[in-house]
Amino acid sequence: MSAALDLLQWRHDMAEPECETKFIDTAEGHSWACGIADDLMACKPLVIGGKEVIKAFDLADKLSELVAGSFDPHNNFNAMILYAATGQGDKAKAAFEAFMGEKYVENLAYEMAAEHAEAYAAERGEDDYE
């Protein structure tokens, strides 16, 4: 009996591992998510399988939700609004980055896209990545 169990254990140990790489962890997946992040920042929806999985202004809604709950001791948010309202885009961007951090919107958009990477890959009929 021990020989049979040893043989089964050996077969298990020698078996090829199943591919556990996720699409988002590949260069193609990263590139896809970066492109989708750019689209989201341009207020374009993410459509997979004919269905809008991220609507055009979902990024703006998520950003608004996160900003509303953030502590702003230096009034950078108020400065950003003032600068945006007076057409001072560079200053508005700088105030926002001081408030939320550099590349905050880009990173948030990427995270939102990454949540749908596996669904996108499945729609394309892919399930084995390297």
Image: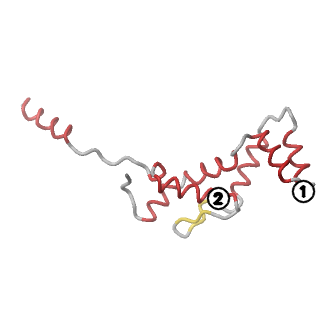
- Which residue is the extreme one toward the top? 2
Disc 2 designates what residue? Answer: 38
- Which residue is the extreme one toward the bottom? 50
Label 1 SS: loop
Q: Nearer the viewer, residue 114 or 93?
A: 93
Quadrant (top left, top right, bottom left, bottom right) of the N terminus: top left
Is 120 above or below relative to 115?
below
Mark 2 neighbour class, 10 Å CA radius: few under 14, some 14 to 19, many 20 or more: some
Q: Nearer the viewer, residue 89 or 106?
A: 89
Q: Residue at x 8, y 29 (%)?
A: 2
Is 121 above or below relative to 63?
below
Specify the amino acid type for callout 2: Asp
Q: Residue at x 46, y 48 (%)?
A: 25
How far apart in space, not on screen, are marks 2 and 1 (Cα)?
23 Å
x, y (%) of residue 46? 60, 63
Is 119 above or below relative to 98?
below
Disc 1 designates what residue? Answer: 87
